[in-house]
Image (tube, grey):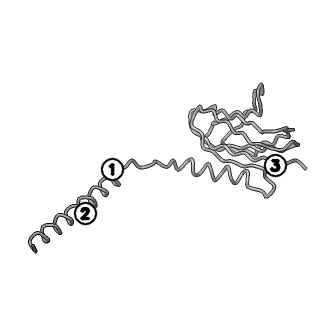
């Protein structure tokens, strides 16, 4: 009987060892997420150029791929609002920000000296932003929505 216990213990130990080795292999073989250090730097730049303030109705920072189009929608109560937008990216990178249907948008530089663009808009129910990246490299876009007093 003690021989059977010994073999059982060895089987349990080998099974546990196999599970541990399998988990280590799985963890080491899993693809690593590549962090683009530029995006981290640009996110910090965008947040410094357009910092959070207490009266914001909404704020968002998003990394956008080259030649991408991105939409943001925010529900609001009717009123007048200030929409501030800024982007950060490689030299020569640009985006186009449109505030509604039929709006051709405004082009923004994402490099060099820049300040946030600020628009005053009247909104009934929703802010709708469309951001189009006009460059062959990614950028970071940031906007904030604040009620106009």
Q: Is residue 123 left or right of residue 33?
A: right
Q: Mark 3 highlights which residue?
A: 146
> Which residue is more in the foreground, 21 or 84?
21
Q: Hey, which quadrant is residue 7 in on the image?
A: bottom left
- Graded by Cα atoms within 10 Å as few (under 14), some (14 to 19) or many (20 or more), the crowding at tag 3 reads some
Q: Is residue 128 left or right of residue 69?
A: right
> Which residue is more in the foreground, 24 or 8?
8
Q: CA distance from mark 1 to mark 3?
A: 46 Å
Instruction: For marks 2 and 3, give the one nearer the viewer.
Output: 2
Secondary structure under badge 2? helix
Q: CA distance from mark 2 to mark 1?
A: 20 Å
Q: Mark 1 highlights which residue?
A: 29
* Circle nearer the N terminus (2, 3): 2
Instruction: Give the label on residue 127, or none.
Output: none
User: Which residue is at a point 72% across and 39% down the rendered structure image?
Assistant: 73
- Graded by Cα atoms within 10 Å as few (under 14), some (14 to 19) or many (20 or more), the crowding at tag 2 reads few
Instruction: Give the label on residue 16, or none.
Output: 2
């Amino acid at each position: 009987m003690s021989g059977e216990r010994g073999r059982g213990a060895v089987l349990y130990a080998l099974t546990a060892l196999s599970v541990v080795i399998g988990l280590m292999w799985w963890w080491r073989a899993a693809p690593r997420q590549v962090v683009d250090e530029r995006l981290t730097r640009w996110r910090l730049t965008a947040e410094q150029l357009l910092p959070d303030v207490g009266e914001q109705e909404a704020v968002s920072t998003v990394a956008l791929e080259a030649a991408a189009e991105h939409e943001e929608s925010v529900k609001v109560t009717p009123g007048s609002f200030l929409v501030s937008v800024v982007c950060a990216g490689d030299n020569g990178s640009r985006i186009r920000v449109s505030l509604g249907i039929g709006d051709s948008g405004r082009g923004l530089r994402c490099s060099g000296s820049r300040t946030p663009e600020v628009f005053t808009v009247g909104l009934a129910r929703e802010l709708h932003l469309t951001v189009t990246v006009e460059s062959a490299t990614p950028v970071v876009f940031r906007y904030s929505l604040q009620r106009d007093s």
